[in-house]
Every structure is written in structure tokens, then in C-alpha cells.
Amino acid sequence: MRKLICIICIVCSLNAIAQTSVAGLFPLENSGRLVWNFNAGWRFHPGDVKGAEKVDFNDKSWEIVSTPHTVQLMPAEASGCRNYQGIVWYRKHFRLPKECTGRDITLHFEAIMGKQTIYVNGQKVKEHEGGYLPITIPLSGSVGDDFVIAICADNSDDKTYPPGKKQAQLDFAYHGGIYRDVWLIAKNKVAITDALEENKVAGGGIFVHYATISDKSAEVFVNTEVRNNDSKPHSITIENALSATVLAGSPAGQKTKLKLQAGEARTITQRFLVKNPKLWSPETPYLYHITTCIKEGKQSLDGGITRIGIRSFEFVRTDDAQGRQPGFYLNGKKYHQLVGANRHQDFAYVGNALPNSQQWRDAKRLRDAGFTIIRTAHYPQDPSFMDACDEMGLFIIVATPGWQYWNKEKGWDEKVHENTRNIIRRDRNHPCVLMWEPILNETRYPEDFALKALQITKDEYPYPYRPVAAADVHSAGVAEHYDVVYGWPGDDFASDGLPIGDPKKIKQCIFTREFGELVDDWYAHNNLNRASRSWGERPMLTQALSLYRSTQELFHTTGQFIGGCQWHPFDHQRGYHPDPYWGGIYDAFRQKKTAFDMFEAVLSGFVATESQQTIKPIVTIAHEMTQFSEKDVTIFSNCDSVRLTMYDGEHCWTQPVDKGLVTFKDAWDFFEARNWSYTKKNWQNVKMVAEGIINGKVVCKTEKMPSRRSTKLRLYVDEMGKKLVADGSDFVVVVCEVTDDLGHVRRLDQCQSTGC
């Protein structure tokens, strides 16, 4: 049931001003900080090349590419560790823009896969390990000088740094290359520092935190660190303004004057009292803006915008001192179960190299399914994905890189801890961040490692309303010390009956990190919840019903159990198995499967029931009316009941909806439909009409007809409201559907199995 898919890329000029966050800040016009998109114009070569770091190396025959870039385009089905592994080289020739005169210049790489050696004008300037966190390179030189930057990136197996596991044993793929954005940043000598560059505990850059939050008022604190890299002192003013939007209204402002000596860095804290704040939640993801300006007299030296969401949250234990019911409390009220998904960053063909628009679309797709929480699997995600989750109301559990691997060699644990510190410093201002996962997933590790990882989360975020640490309940040191534990529905009941104080009794809130998997055999991977779109209607319905049953288990729990994440919403490649992961509710091109309709109906109905919210009524027919379709007709809906009508009213049934699902037994008979088409000469009435009913009134309606002869091709751009950007890096999926004269998709046409 796949459709013809292709990806279209648009190429553009280099100096586009960033409209996304860069190094944690959204650009502020006339602030004194200059940002250029540095993605276009790289030269690329797979394989090692002697002397490729030298300035005079001849790279004219190399392929010209734009970042985000993958080292090899791979078919969506190319699983089983067939992706490129090894050294690749990137080179770029450039001159600094004239606006850089007198400024400090850096190149900011959001991530490069593997380990890297970076050269500027033939000189080695940095070696870096790890493929998921930013790398910053200072540039020293003058406007008009010729620069050559050369990067040797190696995604080969290497157990000396996390994740460390061999790719042939991975349930995902490392892919390779400069697969996230690159930015050229020019700052004045006096400027806001970068939290990762400064390498200070709970310091550097801008850190927004809170003291008290309620629907009546909220205290917002802004820590701003400024460094003077000049050879002389400067008297400056640090201005922070808090407003709902950058341009609307009169923002509340705070100004602090100070004198910075040459080479000195200082942090100042400014307080804002917000009356009747608009509180951030998945249902109302309201974002405030903090506009930061560093001025000397009337001259703006540096600045940027930090988006924040004001929200309070607490995970109440079973032994709560105030006697409250256990569970997750958001903005002072007990919140319904958090249901979401784990997200790998793979996309068809391009591997990990998704542009910002596709990061945004992925967040939109997940929120459209009704999810309210995303666990990153198993590494920090692209900054633009985090920005999108802030906008759309998706909570995030951010995991440190690692999966089923522990290295006993000295220094390995410290590399894991360093990753965790940098993750927190990068993502601490995002309102979407609910938990940190500072340990290695599904890995045996010593207790002292777990305890230090937990302490790092507290040290790096030493303020109220801090994101908490989560880990598997049975891992060393977790049950006794961690804020939230990973377990399963039923673990909240299983510990009942034990006396208070029994060490086996789980007291924390319990969350399922991965639900929905029914693997019978890890070698064969034959299971109900995995279905390729190409397998057609019945396997995808089986998958949807399997995930339906798993989802229902999340709801029959106590308040101590707070939810879980499905594994995994997008099909993707992996190393250790020749079959791709087909358990997604979208395929690798992000085209929906039947399971999407299930989640959309079930979760929206659940949220409406729990929170008494008005919902958009949904009724979806999970049936294609082909000669191979099931006799039973399955419908997903968040309404009270559904009326199904066939053959212009000859058949009509009304049944109540049970937790998002209703099944009409033996409603479809192919030979009856054939009789209408050929004997009664009335094929137009061979259709199903499903009507959703709430409080006795029809509130939504959908129709389904079998497709007839294939006569047309219909193309559409799957842009989801996000237009292509001519920046050299963007792409969008174009879908081609085979239809009949009336526009019904021909589900059984052989052309649909083709990808390009």
C-alpha cells in the first residue's frame, strides 16, 4: 500500500539569516550578533585521502553538497548494517563577510556523526568524539583572507566513546556525515557566552529558571553570563525583557549595569514577576519571549531571544508527606496519563540528515497522533525538533547517547557524564523537557555510575521545577534514589501488600519507556505490531489492533503509573537485522499507517474524558472494501457511537464506541458489493458512510468507496503547512497516488510499491 514517493530539494544562497534557534538563541535583529547559514558549498569525498587537510589540496573533483548531509543515500529498506561506515572528508573554501571586522568568529556545528578531526587552514584545531552534540570552532583571521576548513569524520565502530556498541548489533544506525546545520556566528568582543563552551556547572550563556509558579503569579529568573574578550575594560548594560511576543505590547524590562575588565566574565541574575501567567501545557503550549540585549551606551553589542514556557510540574510519590494522591501534577493539578512515542531521527534515503522543516513536521505528526510525550531514542535530538516540541506541547525525555553497552575501561563513564552535562546545558531552557535519562539504556552499570549521573542532573539544574531523572527500576541504584522509574503497567499493583518501608515497594511514579512490542523471536522478528505499508490493509489493521490493546493497558492503572511511550512511531533502518523496523505508525517517508488513525481517535477521546475538554470529533473507517478485505468493518472514533450505512441505506447499524474502537461484524461482503455493481447496475451506492454521534447528534461523517479502474495519477506535496525554504538544504516529500476517475486511491495497484 505504499505510494510513489520522491524527495525534492531546493538550492539557494549562503547568507540566509537563521529563522531557527542557533546555539540556543533565536536571532534578534540589530542586536550586534550576526548569524549566517553555513550549510551550502561543502566539498565531500567518501574514504580517507592523504593530505586532504592541507590548504593547497586539490578538491575540485569532489562532490559539492549542502549540509545537513548524509554520506550515502540509502533505500528505505537498506537495513542490516549496509550503511556506509568509515572515514569521509568535507572541505570548504570561504572568505569572512566584511561585517565580521573586529568580531570574534566561530563555526557552530550542531552535530557531526562519529569522531572528528577539524582543520582550519591546514592546522588541526579540534578533535571531538560523539555524534549528537554541538562542536564550536573559533576562527582567527581577517576579512578578505582565504579560509579552508577541512573535516575528517569517522563513523566506524569505536568502543572508546558512547554509544560504543558495534553497528552490526545496533537496533538503529549511526549513518554519518555533517548531518545537522552549520552556522557562522560573529560576535563583538563583549558578548553572551555559550554554555557548552564555558563548561561551568549550571553556568554559562542564558539560564532561565523559576522560584514560584501558580495561575496567580510566577517568578522568572534569568541568569546571563557576559564575557569581555577585549584587551580593555567595558562598561555595559545587560537588558532582559519578558514579553508574550517580541513586537507586541510593552515588555517588562530589567537593566543591570556593570564594568567588565579585560578577559573577565560575570553572571547577573534578573527577576521578573508575571501576574496571571499563561501556563504552558500540551493543551496550551504558550511561549513567552525573553529578549536579551547587551549594550554599551546606545550601541548594541550582542543579543538574542530565548523562548520559555512557564509551567510547574511535580511527581508525587506514594509516601507523599502532604498526603496527596501519587501521580504527575502539571500546573498544580493532577494530569492524565502521558502517552507518547520514542523517536529515532532516521528518514528514508537521507538517514539522519533531516532539515529543520522535517524536524518540525515530525513533531507535528507526533502531536497530531495525540501523543503528549516523546522519549528521545537514544540520544539528544536536533535543536529544531526541540523548538518544535516547545511550540506544539510535546513533553520530552532527553536520553544520553547509549544502548545496551558498557565499557569497563577507565574514562568511559566520565565520557557518558560529559554528554549528560552538555545535554542539560544545551536544552535546559526548553519548557518541553520533563525528564533527563542520564544513564545508558538497557545496560548493566555499577551503582556509583547511576548515583553520579543523578547528581549531575541536580548540579546542572539546581533550581525548583527542575526536570527529573528517570531510569529502569531494576538497574543498580535507581529504585532507591531516582525521581521517576521505568516499569510496566501492573508494577504499581505488584508492589501493593508490602509493608511500608519494604525496599521492594516502588514509591516513585512509574513510566513505561517502550510499549507495544510483541516480538516472539528476536532473530526472526515475527510479531503483530510490525507491518510494512507495502503489505497492505490487513497486516496494517492487525498492527493497529495490537497497538490498541497495548495502549489500553496503560489506562488500567493507579495514579502512580503515569504513562508510557510506544516503540517506535517511524519505520527506520537498523544495524543488526536485515529487515527495517516496521513497527511505526508512519513509514520511513512519514506516510500514515492504520495505527495512526487508532492513536488519534483513542488518545483524543481519552484526553477529553479525563480533562472534560471539547474535542474535534473523529470517525475513520479502517477498511478498503477490496476483494481481500476483512468481513468485519473496524472504525476508530472518539464519539459516543457510530452509525454505519451501506448501499444507500439498505444496511444501517448503530453501535457504541468502546474506548475509541467499534467493530461491525460481517458488515462487508464482496459478493454482495459485486451484485450491486453488476446486477443492480448501481455501483455508485457501493459505499460505506460512517457517522460519529455525540449526545444523540451527528457531529462528523466520512465515506469510503472501493476504487475502480486506475485512470489518473495525483500528486501532492506533503508540506503540512511548512513551505520549502530556498536555503540549499530543505526537502519535502512528494506523493503520487494512483486513483480512479472519482479520486479513490487504487490500493492494489502494483505501481504503489515503488519508491524513488
Image (tube, helix red, strand yellow):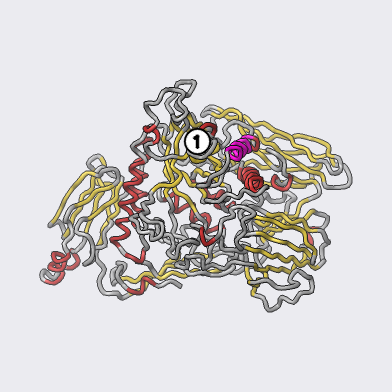
Left-right relation of 615 to 289: left
Q: Is residue 248 visible?
A: no
Name, please, the residue furthest toward the right: 232
Name, please, the residue furthest toward the top: 322
Q: Nearer the viewer, residue 420 or 465?
A: 420
Quadrant occupied by the N terminus:
bottom left
Residue 52 in the image: x percent, y percent?
A: 73, 71
Q: Nearer the viewer, residue 626 or 555?
A: 555
In the image, the segment drawn in magenta is 447-458
Name, please, the residue furthest toward the bottom: 61
Residue 179 in the image: x percent, y percent?
A: 60, 61
Asked if residue 212 lies in the magenta stretch, the reply is: no
Q: Say above or below: 710 vs 586.
A: below
* Main secondary structure along the magenta-highlighted residues: helix
Q: Is residue 323 visible?
A: yes
Q: Say above or below: 30 vs 274.
A: below
Quarter of the rendering containing residue 41: bottom right
Name, please, the residue furthest toward the left: 679
Asked if residue 451 lies in the magenta stretch, the reply is: yes
Left-right relation of 717 to 547: right
Q: Say above or below: 361 vs 678.
A: above
Q: Say above or below: 417 vs 522.
A: above
Q: Amino acid at mark 1?
A: Val
Residue 125 in the image: x percent, y percent?
A: 77, 59
Label 1: element kind = strand
Q: Residues within 10 Å of mark 1 (few under 14, many from 20)?
A: many
Left-right relation of 510 to 422: left
Q: Nearer the viewer, residue 57 or 247?
A: 57
Q: Residue at x 37, y 56 (%)?
A: 521
Pointer 1: what residue?
484
